[in-house]
């Protein structure tokens, strides 16, 4: 948080937004469905790929702001397992843009102490993309600051399938398949996000009210924030607005508000009085 304030001046709108954020309740993990690049381009009569190119600017701004805020992890949905259905030239354009992004950003990832990890079925990507990803992951692997997960060729169901298969394989190797015990913890440990906390906040840009196969297991209790802003227009201000909104929420995880707990005593008295039949 201090890192962010250092970069802002008090006459900026982002300064007053940042001051609204309680540094003690910054989400540990934010996940973002970066959507709306195509519509952004269409509004300008540009080819779709120009929207994706403009989206890279948002990736950079949002990543650096999250690191300055002190997040533990940021997970960005860049390409889903379903996105192969798009025209070949768009998919190929995306791989070239990804290479461009990785080459250009590796030094600033290192400067900002960010560790980049690609999550998804990376082995099915074109070889030149895999090489580039391996290179950046290696170069940033010793960074201790924020972890940036880039979800590429990612699907929430695919991730669960991979987790179950990996679990079975390792039990087979250990000879413990017959006594394999599956718990929520073991499933989490075999996901691509193993070791990370579940996202506190899930953001989707461009107004779509759906999950599109993203982090199905991990978002069980994430707060969801949907904005109509298209991804290329989503910058620092929009991110800070999302965080302010998030901090106004009350996360109950199935429990009840602490503020109403005195009423719990009343509920108890009432229950005793009316002798609620238990059937
Ligand atoms: C999101 O933008 C980026 C990717 C899925 C790669 P879209 O390309 O889905 O943009 P819209 O939804 O068509 O506007
Ligand atoms: C979700 O966006 C995938 C990414 C942002 C990478 P899509 O644009 O592919 O999702 P749908 O098709 O609108 O659900
Ligand atoms: Mg879309």
Image (tube, grey):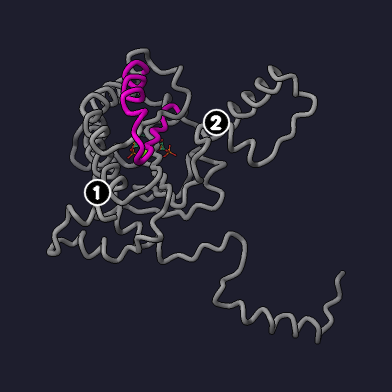
Q: Residues within 10 Å of mark 2 (few under 14, many from 20)?
A: many
Say which quarter of the image contains residue 188: top right
Instruction: Measure the C-alpha gap from mark 1 to mark 2.
Output: 29 Å
- The x and y percentages for residue 231 are 29, 44
Q: Residue furthest top?
A: 127
Q: Earlier in the sequence, mark 1 or mark 2?
A: 2
Q: Quadrant of residue 84?
A: top left
Q: Which mark is residue 31?
A: none
Q: Nearer the viewer, residue 62 or 40?
A: 62
- For the N terminus, the image quarter is bottom left
Residue corresponding to mark 1: 235
Secondary structure found at label 1: loop
Residue plotted at (42% across, 50% down): 28
| Label 2 residue SS | helix
Residue wearing tag 2:
159
Above or below, 84 relative to 253: above
The part of the chain drawn in magenta is 130-153
Rendered residue at 54%/41% (across/down): 216
Image quadrant occupied by the C terminus: bottom right
């Amino acid at each position: 948080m201090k890192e962010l304030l250092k970069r802002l001046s008090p006459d900026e709108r982002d300064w007053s937004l940042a001051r609204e954020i309680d540094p003690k309740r910054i989400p540990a993990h934010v996940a973002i469905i970066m959507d709306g690049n195509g519509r952004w381009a269409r509004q300008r009569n540009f080819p779709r790929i120009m929207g994706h190119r403009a989206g890279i600017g948002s990736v950079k701004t949002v990543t650096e702001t999250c690191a300055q805020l002190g997040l533990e992890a940021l997970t960005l949905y860049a390409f889903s397992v379903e996105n192969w259905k798009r025209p070949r030239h768009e998919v190929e354009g995306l791989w070239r843009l990804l290479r461009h992004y990785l080459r250009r950003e590796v030094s600033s990832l290192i400067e900002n102490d960010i560790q980049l990890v690609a999550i998804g079925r990376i082995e099915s990507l074109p070889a030149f993309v895999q090489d580039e990803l391996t290179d950046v992951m290696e170069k940033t692997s010793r960074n201790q600051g924020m972890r940036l997960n880039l979800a590429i060729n990612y699907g929430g169901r695919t991730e669960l399938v991979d987790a179950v298969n990996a679990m079975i394989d390792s039990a087979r190797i250990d000879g413990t398949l017959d006594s394999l015990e599956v718990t929520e913890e073991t499933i989490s440990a075999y996901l691509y996000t193993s070791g990370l906390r579940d996202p506190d906040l899930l953001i989707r840009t461009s107004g779509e009210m759906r999950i599109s196969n993203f982090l199905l297991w991990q978002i069980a209790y994430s707060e969801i924030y949907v904005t109509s802003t298209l991804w290329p227009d989503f910058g620092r201000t929009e991110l800070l607005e999302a965080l302010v909104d998030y901090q106004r929420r009350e996360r109950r995880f199935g429990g009840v508000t602490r503020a109403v707990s005195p009423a719990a005593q009343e509920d108890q008295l009432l229950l005793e009085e009316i002798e609620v039949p238990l059937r």
